[in-house]
Image: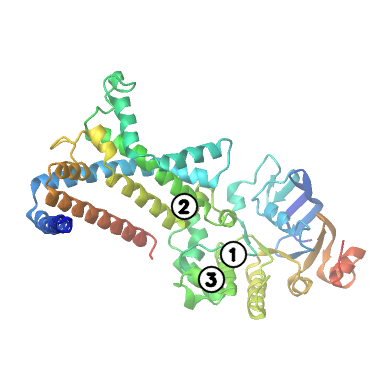
Amino acid sequence: MEFKIDSQIGGSLIDEMLRGLAQATQLIPRRDPALFEIVALSLRVSGAALLVSTLIGLPLGAVLGLRRFAGHRLIVALLYTGMGFPPVVVGLFVYLLLSRSGPLGRLNWSIIPSLFTPAAMVVAQTIISFPLVAGFTMAAVMGVDPQLRQQMRALGATHWQSAWTVLTEARVGVMASIIAGFGSIISEVGAVMLVGGNIEHRTRVLTTAIVLETRKGMFDLAIALGVILLGMSFFTNVAMLYLQGKMFNE
Amino acid sequence: MSELIYQLRNVTKVYDGRRVLHVAHLDIRRGEILALIGPSGAGKSTLLRLLNFLEPPTAGHIRFLDAESDATRPMPFPLRRRVTMVFQRPILLNRSVFANVRYGLRLRGQHDSARQVDAVLEQVGLSPLAHQKARTLSGGEAQRVSLARAMVLQPEVLLLDEPTANLDPYNVELIENIVRALNREQGTSLVLVTHNVFQARRLAHRAALLLEGQITEVGDAASIFDSPRDPRTAAFVRGEMVY
C-alpha cells in the first residue's frame, strides 16, 4: 500500500518535471511578456550589481594581491567572511538600513534607494558579490610569479603598467572571480525577496517568481522558470568566456 | 679614453641591516662588454638591479649618461627605459612569442612595431615560432625570446644576469653569438653577470671580480684572466674555491 502511494507521488513529480520542461520550451518562443519582464529585470539587477562589484572588487583584489600593508590580514579575513555571507542576512541588513526608520532611509536623500525598488536589490546583490570578485581576484593575482613584475619593470613598465600586466596574466582567475560573483547573485533569492518584495511588474525576478509559483503549487511553471534561469546562467558564462578568448586571442 | 656610461661611487646596498654590496668605484664604458664574475651570493645580481634602477642604492651615487641618482633621487624614467635586463629565469607572458617580444614597445606606446619584432625574431632564430604560445617553448627558446624582447627596445645598455645558466651548449653558443653581434654591430654596452669564468673569457672586454659584495679587481679581460694581481682573483679564475 505504502509502496503504491510512493510510486504515485514519484510518478506525479516526474510528470510535473516533464510538463515543466515542455512548458519552458513553449514559453520562450511564445515571448510571453510577463516572462520577458521577469527575465529582463533579473538580468538588469544582477548585471548592474555585477558591474558595481567588479568596479570595486577587481581593484581591491588587485591591491590586496600585489601589496602588503598594515591591516592586510584583517581585510583579507573580512573579505573571506564576506565570501560566505548568507544572502538572506545581507538582505535583512540592507532592509534595516534602507527602511523608513533605518539609519539611511531616514536621511531621505535621493541617491539612497528606497526599499522595494530594483535599486535596493542592486545594493543588496552588490554586497553579496563584491567579496567574491575581490577574494578570487586576490588569489589569482597572488598566483602569478612574483618575479614577473620585476621583469616587466626592467622592460620599462611603470607601476601601473606592471600591475595591469599581472592582472592580464591572472586573467583566467580574474574571469572566474567575475563568473563566481555573477553566479552568486543571479541565483540568490533571500536578499531580493526581503529587499525587493517580489512585487509583480516591479521587483519580481526569476528566483522570487520560482518561490511564488512553487508555493502556489504551480510546479510546472516553477520548473519552467528554473530551466530558463539555468539556461540564462549557462549562456552568460559562455559569453563571458568567449569574450575573454577574443580579448587575448586564445 | 672612451666615454663613460656609468660611474658608481661608494654605492652600498643594505638588506635588513646586512650590507650585501659596497662598490667604492666602478666605471662602465660605452660600447664595452663588462663581465661581473664571482661566486653566488657575492652581490652580482644586486649590482645589476641597481644598474637597472629597479632599486635605489642605500648610499652612494650612480651616474648614468648625464643624470645622477642616489637613495633619494631616482633615475628619471625616460633614462631608466634606456637600460634593460635579461634574467636568469625568463618569465614570459602567457601569450604568443610575437606578443612577448612586442610587449616593451607597447609599453612605450609604439603600436605599429610588427616589422621591428619580425627582424629581432629573425636575429634570434625564432621566426618560425612567432605565433606559438610562449609557454610551450623549451628553456633555450624561452631565453632567446627573453633576449629578443630586450633587444627590440634597442637599449643603450643591456644587462645579462646569468643568461645561459642551465642551458645546453647549442643554445649557449647561439646566445653568445647574438650578444657578440649586438655589441659589435649596434654598439650596445653590455654588463654580463656570470659565475662561469670561461664564458666571461669568451665574451668580455673587461672583467670585475666580486667577492662578498666588494670588487677585488677590475681590468682588461686579458689581465684579469691571465695575470691577475689579487690572489683571490687568481684563485677564482683558476677554478679554486674562494672564501
Q: Chain of mark 2?
A: A
SS assignment at label 1: loop
Q: Chain of mark 3?
A: B
Quickly name the residue at label 1. Answer: B90
Question: In the image, are marks 3 and 1 on the same chain?
Answer: yes
- Checking the image for residue A245, the label placed there is none
Question: Which x, y percent locates residue B76?
Answer: 61, 46
Q: CA distance from mark 3 to mark 2?
A: 27 Å
Instruction: Give the color scheme: rainbow, by chain, secondary structure or one colour.
Output: rainbow
Q: CA distance from mark 2 to mark 1?
A: 19 Å
Locate the C terminus of chain A and report the quarter of the image it occupies. bottom left
SS assignment at label 2: helix
Q: Residue at x 37, y 44 (%)?
A: A54
Quickly name the residue at label 3. Answer: B120
Q: Residue at x 49, y 50 (%)?
A: A139
Question: In the image, are marks 3 and 2 on the same chain?
Answer: no
Identified by mark 1, the residue type is Pro
Q: Looking at the image, do the residues carrying marks 3 and 1 touch, with CB atoms under 8 Å apart?
A: no
Quickly name the residue at label 2. Answer: A167
Q: Earlier in the sequence, mark 3 or mark 1?
A: 1
